[in-house]
Amino acid sequence: MRTTIAPWLATLVVVAVLTACTREDSQNKATTVAGEANNSLTVVTVNYPLAYFAERILGDYGSVSFPAPADVDPAYWSPEPADITAYQQADLILLNGAGYAAWVANVTLPRSRLIDTTIAVRDRLIPIESDVTHTHGPTGDHSHGGTAFTTWLDFDLAAAQATAVADAIVAARSEHEAEFRAAFDGLAADLEALDADLMAVAEALGDQPVVFSHPVYQYLERRYNLQAISVHWEPDELPEEAQWRELQSVLQRHPAKIMIWEAEPLGETRRRLAELGVQSVVFSPGGNRPATGDWLDYMKAGIASLRSQ
Amino acid sequence: MSGVLYLAWQYLAYNRWKTTILVGSIMLIIYLPVGLNVVVEQSGQHLNARAQATPLLVGAKGSPLELTLNTLYFSLDTPELTTFREATSIAESGLAEAIPMYVRFRSRSQPIIGTSFEYFAFRGLTLADGRMPALLGEAVLGATAAETLGVGVGDAVVSSPETAFDLAGIYPLKMNIVGVLEPSFTSDDNAIFVDVKTAWIIEGLGHGHQDLANPDASSAVLNRTADNIVANASLVQFNEITVDNIESFHFHGNLDGYPLTGVIAVPNDDKSGVILMGRYLDSEANNQNVRPRDVVEELLDTILTIQQFIVAAVFIVAVATIATAALVFLLSLRLRRREIDTIGKIGGGRWHVASMLLAEIVIVLVLGCVLAAGLTALTWRYGSAIIESVVMA
């Protein structure tokens, strides 16, 4: 009987040892995966251009999120406390600076993880003076004017912002510096190409006057030396007659043939503008994530629209 | 033997006032040095633990002790004020993490701590309920503060005016409680934590009000020109920050010039700490950099010196007390001559009388020791909190 049981016992012992080894191995693997997951960088941004830059640089070494809903302008979005909690838990919080996303001033965020991507170029930001000051209490006159914030439409400034993003990511995960720097070089080359393309288009436009449908193109105007005036028109609203009269008044002293829009205007608006001899061109600032494509596609499409005029 | 004890006990019980005074005296001469030692040792450990956990403090030049007690233990005395620029400068130096502290206001008896999000991680504070503050005007309470004020998540606390007679002062700010912390058994348990910007709003440096360009606010306009609007005293300033009015809250001027009571600097490493300290050695500098453990050690040294004086005084008092007790005992022997004679006449020997007198002494000593032990135990439990509140006050 003893000789019959012995092989079975030996088999059981071998199976038990192998099972233990396999379990230990899988536990080790799980630990490694968890370790890698813990080491991955979480980045949250206040607008889509910064999210795009971070995604390009970070690659697969972390996750980038931009929690604003798709149908809002992130510059004027107010996050819910749950969104702010997500910002608080991130390793890096990328801010546009220049007063973009004013809600940042009214929330509690970890200061050590805030990266103002325009801090190094703050002397190149464009101040906007408020027309009206007010006085109350002992603090004297003051206005609530601010700074033009669509900084990335100057692709040279966009490159400076991308540099700030890359530096922050490298500082947070220096072990992958080579990969991050290589990815950044690719992004910088793309931004340089965009800059050269738009510069060429702007040179072709020369002194030709332009009208912006909204005052968000200050950096585009300055960098590419466009002769432009801004009005306050919304692409999804039919302008009121007063606004048409104002435009006609503008056109008398500034005979623009092109109006640059943030998004496709209504057909009726486009038709009436054409009657005034003004062609509508869409150059989206790309502040929010597009339904298709990415930020680079947005910018290329905008440049192509301008080139076609 | 039981008869001797019975007689001794009956004598002590009959002369209860004399016994009480003797027991009290014995208790005090034992308790005073022992209890004092317990208090000093425990407070020292308590103060040291928090000081050791705080690498460096930066604040305006003035008393290092005031700066340390205010920043670490939220004492009532406000040190000289520094500015937010100092926190920014430390953070931008890349040498240390800078945690701004503005410990100036209270809600009833609880200190309101204006700080940054990093403070919670630095002190290892975790939530028992709710969430961390996200918006201006939100507060997180320490466990004891929540219990003392009888509030929890969803309730509100109101800041107290700095002085009762500041009629032209700032309206109190109502702050919504969004979280309660787990007990940490430190000063943090008594505190109300808010964003430093919320503390500035309590002070009136930031505020929210009606939009003066809005027609609804016309009654608050004193004078309106093309490029300036002057408000009158009826301008409605908000005393609670809500989702609806938060966008109207703003700060005038550069935040870098706004006040702080101190900055906790957490150097990246020892070398960074030394470099950072070196920056404040210049006698012309407006700010000072202190190591809390040095300040607390100095404070404890002072307390220890005082303790030694007290112990010496207690020793002298103890000798006097024992001498007095001995005198009382000897005098009582004279008074009890007839009682001792009576014991002899009814058959009690010298040994019985001596045993009875010895039993009386032993009972008094034991009672004194037991009471002193009880007081020492109470001191062990509550002494640290009492001494801390006395030091903080």
Image: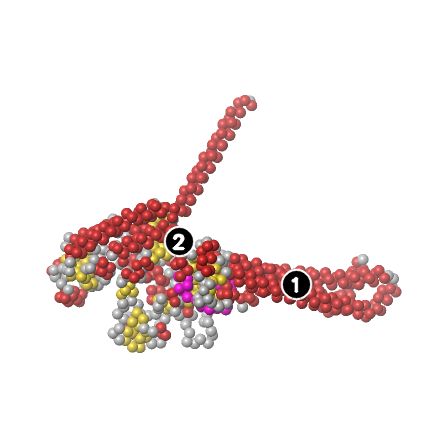
Element at badge 1?
helix
Residue lying at 33% horizontally and 47% vertically, measured from the top left: A180
Within 10 Å of the Cα at label 1, are there few (<14), some (14-19), or many (20+) other Cα atoms? some
Residue at mark 2: chain: A
From the image, tell me which residue sits under label 2. A89
Q: Amino acid at mark 1?
A: Pro
Residue lying at 30% horizontally and 59% vertically, measured from the top left: A121
The foreground one among A50 and B198 is: A50
* Quadrant of the drawing holding the N terminus of chain B: bottom right
Q: Amino acid at mark 2?
A: Gln
Residue lying at 34% horizontally and 74% vertically, measured from the top left: A140
Residue B343 x/y as whole percent: 85, 64
Name the quadrant containing residue B250.
bottom left
Residue B368 x/y as whole percent: 70, 63
Span highlighted in magenta in the image: B69-88
Residue lying at 39% horizontally and 67% vertically, measured from the top left: B257
A277 relative to B328, above or below: above
Residue A169 x/y as whole percent: 35, 51
Element at badge 2?
helix
Q: Measure the alpha-carbon separation of dots 1 and 2.
A: 51 Å
